[in-house]
Image (spheres, rainbow, N blue to C red):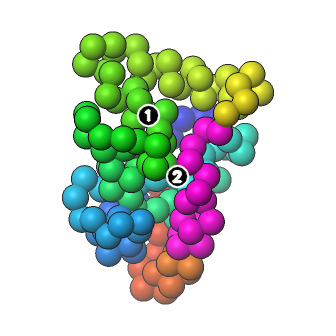
Amino acid sequence: MGKRTLTREQKVWVKERDSYQCVLCGSKKDLHIHHVVGHRVLNLAVEHVENPCLLVTVCKRDHVGPNQSGKDENCIHPDMAWALRRYHKDNGAIARVFAWRNDKIAGKVNKPLWNHSYDQQLMQHAIYETIRYLRVKPWPKDK
């Protein structure tokens, strides 16, 4: 599986489709592109996951948790929220989260990779809005 990232044009397309706001709370600040289901989880090649039907716009707070002092259990990736809070004192925290995720995928850890309470809502939004928006603007090609 090759590592690939979305092009700038593809990221802009997803944000335009989602009206430049978080699909969970409507915030227009600190927007991220979230893979509803990651390629490592599905054991798919990246090109099958970096598809607009699997991408949504979310704010940083909903994606990886609130600021340094807030609670993060309601965000999509509480493990990354934990690592980001500790990063300035422990720059290995993010690497440990990715190692933990790899262990989870390999079946060595029995905890969810992300907060699954948003899955259905995010997937429905991504699919419906992509079908609608493709009529207006084509998905940008890879470079």
Q: Which of marks 1 and 2 is in front?
A: 1
Residue 125 is one of the magenta-drawn residues? yes
Front residue of 37 and 113: 113
Left or right: residue 110 versus residue 83 is right
Q: What stretch is highlighted in magenta?
A: 112-127
Front-most of residues 45 and 87: 87
Secondary structure at badge 1 equals helix
Could you tell me which residue is drawn at 41 percent across and 68 percent down? 23
The residues tagged by marks 1 and 2 sit, at their Cα atoms, a distance apart of 14 Å
How crowded pointer 2 is (Cα within 10 Å; few <14, some 14-19, many 20+) is rated as some
Is residue 114 one of those drawn in magenta? yes
Numbered tag placed on residue 80 in the rendering: 1
Residue 137 or 81: which is nearer the viewer?
81
Name the residue carrying label 2. 35
Residue 46 place in picture, x, y as percent: 60, 45
User: Where does residue 8 sit, x and y in percent of width and height?
Assistant: 33, 54
Element under label 2? strand
